[in-house]
Image (cartoon, rainbow, N blue to C red):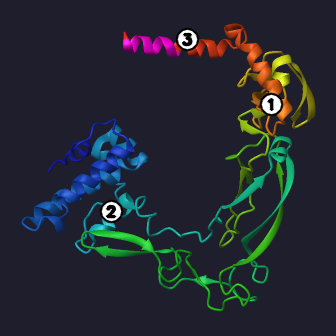
Amino acid sequence: MAKEDFYKLLSLDKNASDAEIKASYRKMAMKFHPDRNKDNPEGAEVKFKQIKEAYEILSDPKKRAAYDQFGHAGVDNSMGGRGGFNNAESFSDVFGDVFGDIFGGGGGRQRSNAQRGSDLRYNLELTLEEAVAGTDAKVRIPVLVSCGECSGSGAKKGSSPVTCNTCQGHGQVRMQQGFFSVQQTCPTCKGTGKQIKDPCGKCYGQGRVQETKTLSVKVPAGVDTGDRIRLGGEGEAGLGGGPAGDLYVQVSVKDHAIFTRDGANLHCELPISFPIACLGGEIEVPTLDGKVKLKIPAETQTGKLFRLRGKGVKPVRGGAVGDLMCRVQIETPVHLTKEQKQWIENLGESLIGGGKQHSPQEHSWTTGVKNFFDKLTG
């Protein structure tokens, strides 16, 4: 009896990818597996044999090439008797190669017990001056390091870990659940594939001990809150010879008494006296580089913004240095003497006649209010 075309058996075309072949095999094999066809196990077994044989040929690049060129004649001798289905063969054994990548690898592969150490995080608080200029900070962190007594093996000096009897060194065990076989971490060795019969007296078989390390962190100029500095290999030590994790230093910049930061720019409120606001003058303004002179023009109003170029921050990722933005706040005199109050009253009376000339903003606002009420009453 002529064999059915392997591609037709798996409902595939000849250009099917490896992933399509695997997916189709899984679907067809689940449908025709004898364990799932109790009403017709013999017929299902025949169909299952054909599907399994087709998958074994098409999933092998060399056999597939031979089949594509010569048909069944090109692969009959290469089967080596593997095409048959043994009734003792379980549903899970058939699908071991298909589901191996889902459940953590095939059951026949040796599992490495090397595990990378965990990453650590440290919150580093800086002043604005330190963040802008850069600094070398010293940090102390509690961390798990490789045990010096046993060199990280966890076994007492002179002994060594042995292969786990439960999983035979694979780190995983199979759990049969109906049609499916699920691989789980070995409960005896916790997935390492090794058992420690005589544990180290210092680390008690863990291979790591906790210490407090002091590290020097070079903080680059221009960092800001939220920036992160990575110190490779300064995290927790790995297990079973695995590499150490990394340490991530999270930057947080403290509030400043004078400046607030917005990216590369700095901002500050600049109080000036009433006479300087009226007549103009020169005042000293603090910057992170020292004091500078700022010329205030006559008749300056509250809220006016002065920009001091290049007095901001140079961003850590490059770019132009920012500016310092100074917003004027005119300070009202307090604790006036009787004589001073009289002078101000005299000044006020002398300015009333000027109206719009001396108080343009007040005049504009008053006019706007009057127009608003006129519309309401009109």
C-alpha separation, residue under disc 1 versus residue under disc 3: 29 Å
Identify the residue position indicated by label 1 in the image.
Answer: 341
* 1 or 3: tag closer to the N-terminus: 1
Q: Amino acid at mark 2?
A: Phe
Q: Residue 369: x, y in percent?
A: 51, 16
Q: Amino acid at mark 3?
A: Thr
User: Residue 327 magenta-drawn?
Assistant: no
- Relative to 327, residue 253 above or below: below
Identify the residue position indicated by label 2 in the image.
Answer: 95
Mark 2 or 1, closer to the camera: 1
Residue 201, quarter of picture: bottom right
Identity of the residue drawn at 34% across and 35% down:
15
Residue 58 as seen in the image, left or right of residue 156:
left
User: Residue 370 magenta-drawn?
Assistant: yes
Residue 307 as seen in the image, left or right of residue 105:
right
| Relative depth, front residue between 156 and 68 | 156
- Magenta span: predominant SS is helix
Q: Amino acid at mark 1?
A: Lys
